[in-house]
Image (cartoon, grey):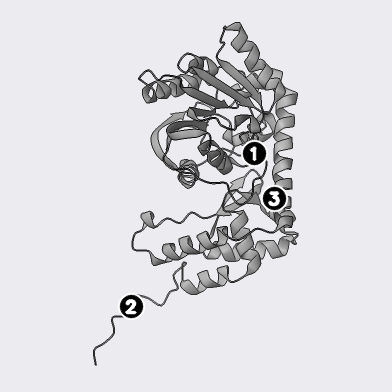
């Protein structure tokens, strides 16, 4: 009788991605719900306790099991730890069968209806984040430029973003439309107004939008429409932009990943998204002084969110600042249309130095 070709292990030490550990992690209804909620956003332990009406000790236990199976990733934001679902892609390791298991199960998890009470509590957490951010900008619109200069002044990243815009749209485009999310005081609107026939300035802070409007009027820029709202605003229905710009905004938004999905629906296929933001850092004073919700982002975070939202990565520029912050300027091209997510929390477009 021929011997079977069973795989053999070189040691008896369990693999961190052992199938039994993975099956245990998936084998609980609450943990499946946690993975679904963490699929498109990051939440702290206390926020997850609120969403699932759970005690902290119980939630920490579930997160420990999920982390042990490499199903969630964590990052520190000041004194808090935030969790999100780990990213698994077969392209990272074509021979990894466990990644294929993760992908199939995650698709099944995401197709399940999320309970209404959970959806409502997710919305409540997002609304609390949004309210804090909007209050900051409304209260600090007049002094925001000075505060932003402590981190990354527009003069340091604006010209580089403008050059990337020029390289992307080097030819003349007829009836082209550009949208800037969170234009702040409107500095980059000048670049857009000179290149595109129509420019839309979108901001959920009325005070910051007035600053941008005044700047445009002073420069006699007459092809800009100003909209007070967020990336889900009904006023954007029917917009098919050639270009969307998001300069120094994502670290102020309640759900950065969802912004990519929202923008996908506002861009033409083949359209360009340009994102400028901070790389991840540990300077916690930025949250209090500048209203930052997130302490920057690892470049791979933006790449993963963009890929999940139907974008392919293009050019990337990284700038090191003397104050210890690093800035990333990223180009993404829309390749596919992505439908609405399972739940749609509030995702305002907080303004920055534009």
Residue 203 drawn above or below residue 28: above
Residue at the image point whose x is 74% and y is 36% from the top: 131
Q: Is residue 107 at all visible to an observer of this figure? A: yes
Left or right: 146 as drawn, with respect to 339: right
Left or right: 117 as drawn, with respect to 255: right
Residue at the image point whose x is 44% and y is 70% from the top: 15
For the N terminus, which image quadrant?
A: bottom left
The residue beneath circle 3 is 122
Crowding around mark 2 (Cα neighbors within 10 Å: few <14, some 14 to 19, many 20+) is: few
* Residue 192, percent from left and from top: 49, 18
C-alpha separation, residue under disc 2 versus residue under disc 1 = 49 Å
Residue 159 drawn above or below residue 221: below
Residue at the image point whose x is 51% and y is 15% from the top: 193
The residue beneath circle 2 is 8
C-alpha separation, residue under disc 1 versus residue under disc 3 = 12 Å
Precedes in sequence: disc 2 or disc 1: 2
C-alpha separation, residue under disc 3 versus residue under disc 2 = 45 Å
What SS does tag 1 mark? loop
Q: Residue furthest bottom?
A: 1
* Residue 236, percent from left and from top: 60, 30
Q: Are marks 2 and 1 in contact (CB under 8 Å)?
A: no
Give the mark toward the camera: 3 or 2: 3
The residue beneath circle 1 is 347
Q: Are marks 1 and 3 in contact (CB under 8 Å)?
A: no
Residue 66 drawn above or below residue 244: below
Q: Nearer the viewer, residue 102 or 290?
A: 102
* Residue 326, percent from left and from top: 49, 32
């Amino acid at each position: 009788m021929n011997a079977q070709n069973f795989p053999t292990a070189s040691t008896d030490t369990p693999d961190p991605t052992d199938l039994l550990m993975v099956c245990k992690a998936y084998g609980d209804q609450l943990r499946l719900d946690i993975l679904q909620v963490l699929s498109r956003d990051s939440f702290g332990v206390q926020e997850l306790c609120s969403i699932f009406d759970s005690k902290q000790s119980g939630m920490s236990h579930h997160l420990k099991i999920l982390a042990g199976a490499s199903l969630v990733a964590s990052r520190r934001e000041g004194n808090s730890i935030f969790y999100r679902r780990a990213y698994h892609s077969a392209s990272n390791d074509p021979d990894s069968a466990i990644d294929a298991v993760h992908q199939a199960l995650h698709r099944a998890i995401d197709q399940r209806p999320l309970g209404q009470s959970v959806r409502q509590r997710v919305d409540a957490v997002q609304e609390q984040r949004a309210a804090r951010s909007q209050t900051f900008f409304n209260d600090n619109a007049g002094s925001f430029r000075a505060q932003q200069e402590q981190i990354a002044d527009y003069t340091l990243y604006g010209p580089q973003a403008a050059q990337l815009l020029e390289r992307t749209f080097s030819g003349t485009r007829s009836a082209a439309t550009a949208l800037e999310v969170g234009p702040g005081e409107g500095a980059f609107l000048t670049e857009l107004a000179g290149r595109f026939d129509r420019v839309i300035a979108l901001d959920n802070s009325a005070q910051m939008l007035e600053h941008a409007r005044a700047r445009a009027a002073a420069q006699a820029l007459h092809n800009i429409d100003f909209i007070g709202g967020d990336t889900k605003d009904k006023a954007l229905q029917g917009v098919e932009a050639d270009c969307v710009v998001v300069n120094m905004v994502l670290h102020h938004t309640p759900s950065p990943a969802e912004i990519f999905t929202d923008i996908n629906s506002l861009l033409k296929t083949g359209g360009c998204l340009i994102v400028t933001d901070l790389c991840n850092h540990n300077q916690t004073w930025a949250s209090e002084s500048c209203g930052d919700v997130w302490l920057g982002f690892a470049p791979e975070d933006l790449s993963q969110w963009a890929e999940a939202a139907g974008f392919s990565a293009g050019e990337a520029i990284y700038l090191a600042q003397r104050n210890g912050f690093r800035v990333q300027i990223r180009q993404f091209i829309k390749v596919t249309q992505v439908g609405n997510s399972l739940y749609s929390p509030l995702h305002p477009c907080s303004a920055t130095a534009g």
